[in-house]
Image (spheres, rainbow, N blue to C red):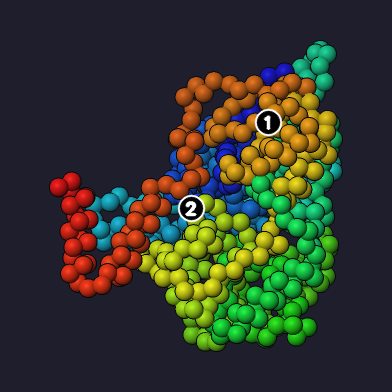
Amino acid sequence: MAVTLRVCGAARTVTGLCLLFEAPGARFLVDCGMFQGPKSLKALNYEPFPFDPRALDCVLLTHAHIDHSGLLPKLAKAGFRGPIHATRATRDLCSVMLPDAGHVQEMEVETLNRRNRRRGGMEPVTPIYTAEDGERVIGQFRTVELDEWTEPAEGVRARYWNAGHMLGSASIELEFAAPAGAAEAPLRILVSGDLGPDCSVLQSDPQGPAGVDHVICESTYGDEDRPPCSEAERRARLAEIVRKAARRGGALLVPSFAVERAQEVMWDLVTLMDAGEVPEAPVYLDSPLAIRASRIFLRHAGALAEGKALARALRSPRLRFTESQEQSRAIALEDGFHVIIAGSGMCEAGRIRHHLRNWLPDPRATVLFVGFQAEGTLGRLLRDGARDVRIQGERVKVAAQIAEIADYSGHADGPELGRWIAARAPVRGGVFLVHGEEAAIEGLARRIVGRRVVPETAILRPTLDEAFALSPAAPPARLPDRGRRRTDAERLGHLDWHNARAALLLSIERALDEAPDDAAREALIRRLRAAIEGT
């Protein structure tokens, strides 16, 4: 049976999942995500796809997060006209997330072009797609139900399983029929999508079939072992941070992903304030996307484990939803303790950046991270203890307190991923580890070896655009490159020269600030100029 898999995204990085499957009579994607992180990785979003979008039969979408769905409008612009199969909640969330992603790109490109015009001599940049493109692609969505077989392409069946990651998320089981007259069994593949933790407050535990040929599994937290955390323990940790932030008397900034994380944080804050466990304060949800997503959560509350309690919290008068730019800017006039929840979760775009620029230099402020921070992002730099950072070309000193709660993560940790993979046994072929940085992938690989799910040689760590031949009950076989690689796959997802330049500029400015007098500063500048000019 000739089935090939090409890993076109989230290969040794956490974002941009895109899997191309090709079989006789069928050619389709599972997910079509946007790359996030270092600029060299995000640059892939502007490059042509490594396949012909017009030749695709369909897309199967695991969930709505932008690193899984964010390039669907670009795919349609490039000629894809087939259906996009997703759960109803995923379609509803994409209907607000994809137009929002297009709007963000339009705004960022407008700012960049304005800056380039001032510099002179640079060609204008166009967005990857617009808000209108994001709205248009929703017409291609077709809803599917969990646990029911569908036939999205010739000779292919698909079944969606609850992944426990977020509203509407799914793992996708694929079955490729054997050629007519062949004696072999169908080829069965399971794509995990993103898997939720076992102790999720809102979602049921991840599920999936046993006895498949190949598993393609995310590995975001494959090297971490988080202690089990109850809802009460999570709220207690949040309460401690909130009380400390209130004593400092400044803003508590929560960079948050707009879908599920923002809603959970609001729920916990409202619950703690209603119970008198933390000081009362205004809670601003400064994210148009999170506001629209919250309305979708209210619509689908019946599908969530604690949907009624969440719905009550989202309707609380303690919450202040700021949709317009004017309302967002007005928050800067707020003094004293208050809470601002804003996107993006990794501080790479959105309104959180102007709040950080305002508050990072203030020791009264607290920044609380509640989600994954990819290498090279502003959020990762802050979480790792940067003394100063650059935001929109401006140096910003960091005097604010930095805190983190890992208990809000929507991803399974290493032991949970290991147990989920082991529950798919017998796995007769191989296990592909994607959607993770290298340390996380290696950590999860060790767990799989320890559980003896497959031989160590059958654990694959694909690089970008690498292709494999898949057969029933046999290890995957790597295919020749054929010159289809887009970039230096080994370097993707790591700190790049853009990060190095920003760090260098910050070091120079810091050294000039800390020099004892003007003479020392002039001497430093002379040495720098000599080094650059090679004299």
Residue at position x 38%, y 57% in the image: 503
Q: Amino acid at mark 1?
A: Ile
Q: Quadrant of residue 97?
A: bottom right
Q: Amino acid at mark 2?
A: Gly
Q: State whether residue 311 is above or below residue 40.
A: below
Residue at position x 54%, y 38% in the image: 79
Q: Secondary structure at mark 1?
A: strand
Residue at position x 49%, y 35% in the image: 489
For mark 1, does the 10 Å Cα neighbourhood hold few (<14), some (14 to 19), or many (20 or more) residues?
A: many
Q: State whether residue 520 is above or below residue 224.
A: below
The residue that disc 2 covers is 376
Q: Is residue 142 visible?
A: no
For mark 2, does the 10 Å Cα neighbourhood hold few (<14), some (14 to 19), or many (20 or more) residues?
A: many
Percent of width and height locating residue 50: 51, 33
Q: How many marks?
A: 2
Percent of width and height locating residue 335: 52, 87
Q: Secondary structure at mark 2?
A: loop
Judging depth in this view, the residue of 245 and 182 nearest the camera is 245
The residue that disc 1 covers is 459
Q: Is residue 227 visible?
A: yes
Residue at position x 76%, y 77% in the image: 271
Percent of width and height locating residue 293: 66, 64
Is the Cβ of the residue at disc 2 closer than 8 Å to that at disc 1?
no
Quadrant occupied by the N terminus: top right
Percent of width and height locating residue 509: 31, 65
